[in-house]
Image (cartoon, rainbow, N blue to C red):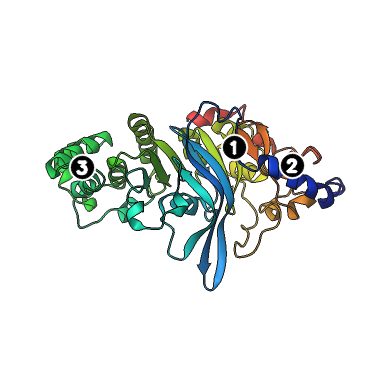
Amino acid sequence: MAELEKVCTKSFLPEERRISAQGGKVFAKNTESSAGREKILSVQDLVIKFKLRGQVLTAVRGVSIDVYRGESLAIVGESGSGKSVFAKSFMGLLDNNGWVDSGSILFDGCDLTKISREKEWTQIRGKRIAMVFQDPMTSLNPLRTIGGQIREALLLHGSLSRAEAKEQTYRILADVGIDDPKRRYRQYPHEFSGGMRQRVVIAIAIAGRPEFLICDEPTTALDVTIQAQILQLLKGLQKKYRLTVIYITHDLGVVAKVADRVAVMYAGDIVEVGSCEEIFFDPRHPYTWALLSSMPQLRAKGEELCTIKGTPPNLYQTIRGDAFAPRNPQALVADFKARPPYFYVTPTHAARTWLLDPRAPKVEPPGHIKRLGEEGGWRNG
């Protein structure tokens, strides 16, 4: 503890402002990470708030990140960390009591935060950005046929005749792995299993031929075998339809199978971002260590499963310093005083933690995290 006390707040605060001014974005311009890659989405300093019971809750706290065309980005974190709220803001789907307080969301050059009319959103939702929700049963209308719901999306976002839309629906049903499309077209959601309903939800999402697909916990309601099938289906559709995909999940096993890049979110902020290999095999933020430590694959037989002690912070209140500090046994004094900037480990890997400051004491990750790179065979399991 005496060693940690040496990292005092006074020595960090002036430096923190300087570092933030130079590298406050998750991905800075002109780095190897962005060279030769086309940005499809750029979020800058996004703040989202909600009014609940007379109080204001800050669900997303100054998030910045770039998404590149054709990639798979996974956003991971505990429930309540702001993942779904963050992604829903790309489609103007915040609840009536929520709003974008500041920041920008540039999609192909258009600032989505400036869109206020529903007519303008219809040119974005489904047509350019689509979403697959986690519960397929509540995503489908039980009173309408499967084919009718997919065809509706085609008619809304295209210029097809009803007959052409019907034929296109058959092809989409085949694309998502549903056999005998003509018979299935006439059936209702209750005649489908959970996995088949999720395939239908995916079919509706891709019917408008969007460029950008958001998958919000797409396998949570499914059993393990079906999860693998749905993930394989999404990977195939991404390639065939040339999609950029964001996966929202708390399941790191899902992330390992589908993601090119991972953003770790905690208390409304992205605390670490990097390639899938960097996040799994060289994590740098203590929260990322804690998430990985909670994976059953990392525990020896008979060894107790790790849990993250404590609870997330109260987002009704202003958070000082690192939001994870109260739950972090390696927290420095500075973690409770000043919000850390992003420190770059590589041009593609950054973490918001004072542990990466050159003046911080050396803190090693847990032993099983250090061994993860050597024992990474589970990733393909």
The amino acid type, in three-letter code, at marker 1 is Phe
Within 10 Å of the Cα at label 3, are there few (<14), some (14-19), or many (20+) other Cα atoms? few
State left or right for residue 87 relative to residue 123.
Answer: right
State left or right for residue 222 relative to residue 250.
Answer: left
Check disc 3 and report the residue beneath it. Answer: 159
The amino acid type, in three-letter code, at marker 3 is Ser
Percent coordinates x, y for residue 162 in the rendering:
14, 45
- Identify the secondary structure beneath mark 3: loop
Q: What is the CA distance from the residue labelled 2 to the residue labelled 1?
A: 19 Å
Q: Residue at x 46, y 33 (%)?
A: 71
Q: Is residue 378 above or below residue 164?
A: above
Q: What is the CA distance from the residue labelled 2 to the residue labelled 3?
A: 55 Å
Question: Which callout, 3 or 1, points to the residue nearer the camera?
Answer: 3
Upstream in sequence: badge 2 or badge 1: 1
Check disc 1 and report the residue beneath it. Answer: 27
- Identify the secondary structure beneath mark 1: loop
As rendered, which of 71 and 175 lies closer to the eye? 71
Upstream in sequence: badge 3 or badge 1: 1
Question: Which callout, 2 or 1, points to the residue nearer the camera?
Answer: 1
As rendered, which of 83 and 280 lies closer to the eye? 83
Q: Residue at x 49, y 51 (%)?
A: 86
Question: Which callout, 2 or 3, points to the residue nearer the camera?
Answer: 3
State left or right for residue 87 relative to residue 284.
Answer: left
Q: Residue at x 75, y 46 (%)?
A: 16
Q: Is residue 102 above or below residue 235?
A: below
Q: What is the CA distance from the residue labelled 3 to the residue labelled 1?
A: 39 Å
Tag 2 near tag 3, CB within 8 Å: no
The amino acid type, in three-letter code, at marker 2 is Leu
Tag 2 near tag 1, CB within 8 Å: no
Q: Is residue 238 above or below residue 288?
A: above
Within 10 Å of the Cα at label 1, are there few (<14), some (14-19), or many (20+) other Cα atoms? many
**Any mark on residue 355, and which?**
2
